[in-house]
Amino acid sequence: MTEADLNTRHAEKMKKVQAARARMMASKTVERGLVIVHTGAGKGKTTAALGMVCRMIGHGMKTSIIQFIKGAMETGEQNLFDAFPDLVEMRPMGEGFTWDTQDRAADIANVRRAWDAARARIMDPDWKMVVCDELNIALRYDYLPVEEVLEVLAARPADTHVVITGRNAPPELIEAADLVTDMQMVKHPFRGGVKAQAGVEF
């Protein structure tokens, strides 16, 4: 088969793919807020959520990021989001991971404070996306009832997106979500002794 024959065959195949894709897209007419869950042992859960925040900024829509575990520290994303104070807020409301705090009562109190802030933003129609960063960790340790989270998600304004990150998302949340991504770790430099890198992890 000549190069010209291959090119013609490819063009014909792509024309059929294009037509099938157009038919599929024509049936997608619903527009509404989504519950999005990023879970799994692989890196990139928060990173993916923050990428969506950048898209929201690009569309001029307000976004709130509530961090349930991470405490205040200088990060590249915080420095970037500070340039858009009318469109995005980033609120680190934790004190670090549970193995660092070693204080269950304080951890539960911090999670409750963060959830109260997140719930207020979720229910306020001015905020079009709310990122609940590492909420899954709080749910895993039973610091917050998953039923309470599901009730708020079900009652939120129709066009509000909620993004929830963290390992070990509970089955009930996965069932309620519209979009779930399970990030699997194949390789990670941490296992080779490489520490967290500016611009990659923070």
Image (cartoon, rainbow, N blue to C red):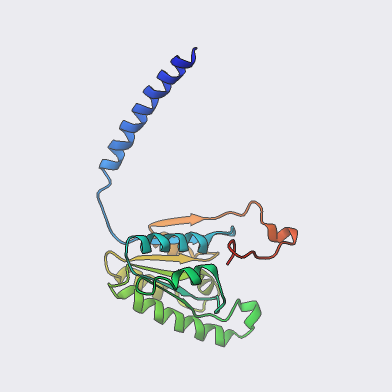
| Quadrant in which residue 63 is drawn | bottom left
Residue furthest front in the image: 83
The quarter of the image holding the C terminus is: bottom right
Relative horizontal placement of residue 191, taking residue 76 as reference (left or right) = right
Residue drawn at the location 50% of the way across and 71% of the way down = 79
Relative horizontal placement of residue 95, taking residue 30 as reference (left or right) = right
- Relative image position of residue 136 (x, y in whole percent): 50, 69
- Image vertical order of residue 170 relative to residue 103, above or below: above
Residue furthest right in the image: 193
| Quadrant in which residue 53 is drawn | bottom left
- Image vertical order of residue 94 relative to residue 79, above or below: below
- Image vertical order of residue 178 relative to residue 3, above or below: below
- Relative image position of residue 75 (x, y in whole percent): 55, 71
- Image vertical order of residue 193 relative to residue 102, above or below: above
Camera-side residue of 67 and 170: 67
Q: How many marks?
A: 0
- Relative image position of residue 92 (x, y in whole percent): 50, 78
Residue drawn at the location 41% of the way across and 56% of the way down = 179
Residue drawn at the location 42% of the way across and 60% of the way down = 52
